[in-house]
């Protein structure tokens, strides 16, 4: 990686060697179906349930509360849509409350609930991405089926006061959900701080492969199943389990939680090094959500007049991998709904680039970005002038 | 890279020749099927282009030029129809979006050359018709900056469409057998009136009823908006006359659509505006051939008036339906594009 800098860990991180070691046997001799009663099935079942226990122990919940999913998106959908359907079954309205800065998985699930005849309420945030508390309190009065607030924002790193929000929901008798995908391993994540909450996690953000995640479901009635099948995972999420993935998630979650404190300190130092270097080169640099509570691994910044779309091309060709506001599946960079919701002016929002750090990040990678970014900014500002003249 | 077979093969051929190639796709519009929670419309064509780039092992970037394309091309498209004319948005896109904006991005990346999947041949800074007479796209390229020609590459310009497809198949490109796109990219289902309806107020003159008159002035019917008509059109006119009727003129001022017999479409004079030269400008008295629409043969002509930005020509034989808004493209005998302009 000497001539490359991968600074897009919020998108995904490499699989950790320990995790590879843990999961490999489940592609080989422990290939069985965990539902089978013979020895092959038992070997797989042992791995699966061991992984469930690892996740449970790391997060401070019971193994029976861990539901493996295909990832964060499915976990979020199960929480919101499954939560709304469970409320409907109990004769309550399918109202879901969330924030304008959530991941698309939550926003899309909330709007799906609305299309199913329910209601979706989006709460505003302030200039540093913090949820407006008055709007939040007011929304609790509507007796929603689920209130969903992400722990750490995936674009800006803004950190919400999750324990306080969860407590307010508990007091109001409202189910709380948090997308903790970007929080796990970066800030302390424990169910003890938010008892009774639904929690989404994703494997590939913490060194497990893509295609595995989990939803913590405190009690079976909290969500209704979205897929239907053979009754695996208590019927909440049936289908033959991705055993190797689950094992990977178990090991990765265990490591992420065990190493969180030292890892966060390392990330914070790298982030500081990055911002110090960039600010020296570009005094007019704007760092979004920097002044509020935030996680240590994300720096979302704008150099006025340098649009991110062109910047990301320059950075990529210079060997620096970062991302724009939110990359859609085609790779087109769209204005970020998160920055827009924070009141960031459109022109500044279009310049936003997200650098995100992870376990493999080094000083050398950060220094490479510090060297490449100002050069790219200068070229893109020239381009902006050239286009402006046409 | 549009995601179609032509630009896919163009990229593949350049990679084969050992060039360092950077793929770019212009995102020019968003169809109205957006759902509020989707990050953007995931146009299949962009995905196709991306797949090809991945298969070729080259970088690929999507350039969102929606705003600029909207101003430079879509707005002009609407304005031209509102003026009773028949625009060619592909010409505007080439002149502005592709060969100015996209090239500016290429400049910013220090690219030595810019390549497209056009069926046209570039040689020594001159532009010629493509080798496949059925596919030749040089007609659409008259408006590009002459300065770009020196660094423009058109790797499929010397191939026939069949040869291009064969190359694509040989390279295993997923786009090899993609159906030809002949529609205007931002006009869904070939229904351009729906685009006008989207951009114009409901009571816009171009979409409001008006008289259909013969060239003699006789009122023979009513239409539902002159923007639904183009010169030479037969469809949508009242029947019952002895010989077939064609639209011969559109008068936006009183919203009149004028119809006449086939021979009334014939014209000898072409007057061009927004003239752009891709060779040395022709002076009064010079001869060339002029092509007045995409699917028609070029006709020998003599320049009768030449001044900056404007040009008048007299044709050797009459051309059918010389239509304001279409392009008049000037060719030499060897098929070189000398320049062109918008027909007035």
Image (tube, coloured by chain):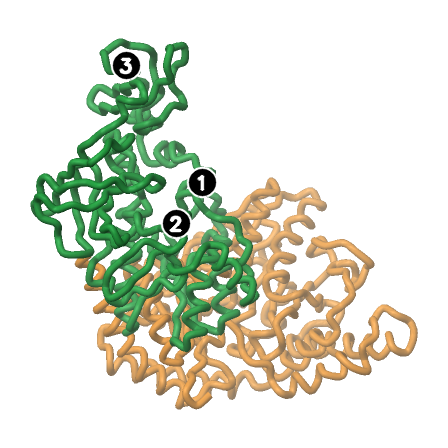
Chain colours: A orange, B green
Choose between A25 and B5: the one closer to the eye: B5
Choose between A96 and B89: the one closer to the eye: B89
Position of residue B205 relative to residue B181, above or below, is above
- Quarter residue B211 falls in: top left
Position of residue B11 relative to residue B215, above or below, is below
Give the x, y percent position of residue A227: 72, 54
Q: Closer to the camera: disc 2 or disc 1?
A: 2
* Mark 3 crowd level (few <14, some 14–19, many ≥20, 10 Å Cα): some
Q: Which mark is residue B188?
A: 1
- Residue marked by disc 3: B213
The reply to whether dot 2 and dot 3 touch (C-beta < 8 Å) is: no
Q: Residue at x 44, y 79 (%)?
A: A7
Alpha carbons under labels 1 and 3: distance apart: 31 Å
Q: Residue at x 63, y 78 (%)?
A: A253
Alpha carbons under labels 2 and 1: distance apart: 27 Å
Instruction: Indicate which disc, 1 or 3, sits on the residue closer to the N terminus.
Output: 1
Q: Closer to the camera: disc 1 or disc 3?
A: 3
Q: Is residue A299 left or right of residue A214?
A: left
Residue A276 visible at all: no
Tell if the residue under mark 2 belongs to the same chain as the one under mark 3. Answer: yes
Position of residue B79 relative to residue A227, above or below, is above
**Parent chain of label 2:** B
**Parent chain of label 1:** B
* Mark 2 crowd level (few <14, some 14–19, many ≥20, 10 Å Cα): few
């Amino acid at each position: 990686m000497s001539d490359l800098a991968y600074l897009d860990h919020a998108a995904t991180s490499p699989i950790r060697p320990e995790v590879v070691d843990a999961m490999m046997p489940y592609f080989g001799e422990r290939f069985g179906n965990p539902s089978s009663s013979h020895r092959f099935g038992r070997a797989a079942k042992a791995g699966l349930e061991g992984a469930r226990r690892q996740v449970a122990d790391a997060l401070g919940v019971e193994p029976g509360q861990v539901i493996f999913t295909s990832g964060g998106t499915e976990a979020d959908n199960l929480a919101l849509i499954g939560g709304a359907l469970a409320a409907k079954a109990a004769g309550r309205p399918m109202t879901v409350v969330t924030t304008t800065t959530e991941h698309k998985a939550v926003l899309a699930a909330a709007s799906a609930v609305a299309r199913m005849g329910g209601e979706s309420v989006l709460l505003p945030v302030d200039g540093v991405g913090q949820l407006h508390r008055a709007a939040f309190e007011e929304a609790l009065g509507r007796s929603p089926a689920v209130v969903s607030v992400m722990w750490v924002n995936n674009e800006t790193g803004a950190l919400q006061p999750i324990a306080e929000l969860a407590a307010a929901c508990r007091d109001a008798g409202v189910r709380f959900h948090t997308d903790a995908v970007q929080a796990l391993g970066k800030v302390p994540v424990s169910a003890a701080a938010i008892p009774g909450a639904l929690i989404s996690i994703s494997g590939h953000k913490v060194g497990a492969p893509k295609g595995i995640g989990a939803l913590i479901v405190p009690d079976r009635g909290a969500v209704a199943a979205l897929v239907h099948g053979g009754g695996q995972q208590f019927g909440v999420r049936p289908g033959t389990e991705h055993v190797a993935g689950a094992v990977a998630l178990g090991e990765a979650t265990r490591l992420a939680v065990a190493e969180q404190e030292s890892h966060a300190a390392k990330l914070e130092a790298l982030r500081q090094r990055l911002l110090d270097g960039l600010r020296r080169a570009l005094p007019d640099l704007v760092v979004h959500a920097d002044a509020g509570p935030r996680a240590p691994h994300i720096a979302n910044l704008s150099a006025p007049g340098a649009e991110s779309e062109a910047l990301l091309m320059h950075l990529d060709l210079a060997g620096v991998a970062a991302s724009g506001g939110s990359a859609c599946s085609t790779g087109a960079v769209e204005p970020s709904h998160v920055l827009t919701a924070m009141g960031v002016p459109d022109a500044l929002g279009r310049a936003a680039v997200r650098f995100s750090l992870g376990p493999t990040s080094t000083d050398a990678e950060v220094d490479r970005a510090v060297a490449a970014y100002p050069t790219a900014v200068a070229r893109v500002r020239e381009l902006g002038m050239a286009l402006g003249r046409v | 890279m549009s995601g179609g077979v032509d630009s896919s093969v163009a990229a593949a051929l350049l990679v084969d020749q050992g060039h360092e190639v950077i793929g770019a796709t212009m995102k020019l519009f968003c169809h109205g099927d957006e759902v509020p929670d989707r990050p953007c419309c995931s146009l299949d064509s962009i995905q196709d282009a991306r797949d090809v780039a991945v298969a070729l092992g080259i970088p690929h970037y999507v350039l969102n030029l929606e705003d600029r394309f909207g101003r430079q091309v879509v707005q002009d498209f609407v304005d031209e129809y509102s003026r009773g004319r028949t625009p060619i948005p592909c010409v505007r896109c080439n002149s502005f979006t592709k060969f100015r904006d996209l090239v500016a991005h290429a400049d910013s990346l220090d690219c030595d050359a810019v390549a497209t999947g056009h069926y046209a041949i570039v040689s020594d800074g001159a532009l010629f018709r493509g080798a496949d007479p059925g596919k030749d796209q040089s007609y659409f390229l008259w408006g590009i900056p002459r300065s770009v020609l020196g660094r423009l590459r058109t790797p499929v310009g010397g191939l026939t469409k069949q040869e291009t497809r064969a190359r694509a198949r040989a390279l295993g490109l997923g786009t090899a057998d993609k159906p030809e796109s002949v529609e205007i990219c931002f006009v869904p289902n070939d229904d351009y009136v729906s685009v006008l309806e989207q951009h114009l107020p409901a009571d816009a003159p171009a979409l409001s009823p008006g008289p259909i008159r013969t060239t003699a002035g006789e009122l023979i019917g009513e239409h539902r908006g002159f923007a639904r008509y183009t010169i030479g059109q037969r469809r949508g006119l009242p029947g019952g006359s002895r010989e077939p009727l064609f639209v011969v003129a559109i008068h936006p001022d009183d919203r009149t659509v004028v119809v006449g017999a086939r021979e009334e479409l014939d014209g000898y004079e072409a007057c061009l505006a927004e003239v752009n030269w891709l060779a040395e400008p022709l002076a009064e008295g010079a001869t060339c051939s002029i092509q007045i629409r995409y699917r028609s043969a070029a006709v020998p002509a003599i320049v009768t008036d030449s001044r900056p930005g404007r040009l008048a020509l007299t044709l050797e034989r009459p051309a059918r339906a010389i239509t304001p808004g279409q392009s008049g493209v000037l060719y030499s005998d060897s098929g070189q594009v000398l320049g062109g302009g918008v027909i007035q």
